[in-house]
Amino acid sequence: MNILWDYDGTLFDTYPAYAKRMSLVLNGVSEEDCYTQLKVSATHAINHFRMTEAQINEYNLLISRISPEEMPPFDHVEDVLKQADYNVIMTHKDQEGAHKVLDYYGFTTYFREIVTADHGFPRKPDPAAYEYLHNKYRIDLAVGDRELDIIPAKQLGMYTCLFQNDKPADFHLKSYRNFFDVVIF
C-alpha cells in the first residue's frame, strides 16, 4: 500500500503546542479555542481571531522555536509506516521544520518523498502536490486529520482516511492501533 500522509495532526500531535503559542500571542483566548480553530486550518484561525501582522509574525516565531519533544508522533503510527510499501508526505510546513521533527524521532527514512511549502505547490485543497505524488508513486490512500487534507485526494480518485475526524471519508480512525483492520480495499 502506498500512502500519502499529512503531517500536523496526522503523524505528529502538533496542535496542542501550536494552540499554546497562539493563546500566548492572543492573550486571553484559551488554548482550547485556539486548538478548535487551528484544526480547521492555520489560515482559518488567523482570520477567525483577526490576528494582526505583528501577531502573526510573533506566532510564527514561537512556532519555529517549538522543540520536537512537544510534537510527539501519535501512538502506533510508526507501525503503519513500517508496513506500507511507500510513504510520502504533503505538508504546508517548511522543509526545515518538517525534518527537525522527523529526524528527531527517526522517521525520515520511512518516507520516499516529503513535499513541503518550500516546493512551491499551491496550498491544499489545490490538488497539484497530490497529483505530482500520485503520478510518481501511484498513491492508494491519503491520510489526514482535516477535511482539507482529503479534498485533493478525492478529486484524484484516491481512497481517503481521516484520523480523529468524522467528516466524510472512505475510512475513519481514532487510533492507528487498528489501522489495517479498518483500512481494507
Image (cartoon, rainbow, N blue to C red):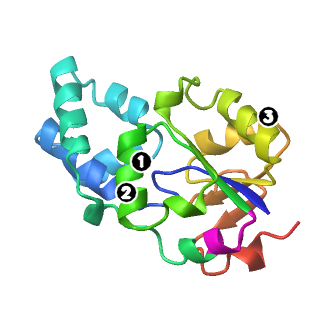
Q: Which element is circle 3 on?
A: helix
Q: Are marks 1 and 2 in contact (CB under 8 Å)?
A: yes
The spot of residue 123 in percent (x, y) is 55, 27
User: Which residue is under mark 3?
Assistant: 155
Total marks shown come to: 3
Residue count near mark 2 (Cα–Cα under 10 Å), binned few <14, some 14–19, many ≥20: many
Q: Residue at x 58, y 23 (%)?
A: 122
Rounded to the nearest whole Å, what is the CA distance between mark 3 and mark 1? Answer: 26 Å
Of 123 and 101, nearer the camera is 101
Residue type beneath disc 1: Ala
Q: Is residue 156 left or right of residue 4?
A: right
The spot of residue 39 in percent (x, y) is 44, 47
If you read the primary sequence from the N terminus, does the residue marked by circle 3 or circle 2 appear first?
A: 2
User: Which residue is under mark 2?
Assistant: 101
Q: Residue at x 41, y 29 (%)?
A: 43
Residue count near mark 3 (Cα–Cα under 10 Å), binned few <14, some 14–19, many ≥20: few
If you read the primary sequence from the N terminus, does the residue marked by circle 3 or circle 1 appear first?
A: 1
Q: Is residue 39 left or right of residue 67?
A: right
Is residue 92 shown above or below 81? above
Residue type beneath disc 2: Val
Q: Which element is circle 1 on?
A: helix
User: Which residue is under mark 1?
Assistant: 98
Residue 85 in sight here? yes
Q: Which residues are magenta?
A: 80-85
Asked whether residue 71 is drawn in magenta, I would say no
Residue 175 in sight here? no
Q: Are marks 3 and 2 in contact (CB under 8 Å)?
A: no
Indicate the quadrant where residue 1 lies: bottom right
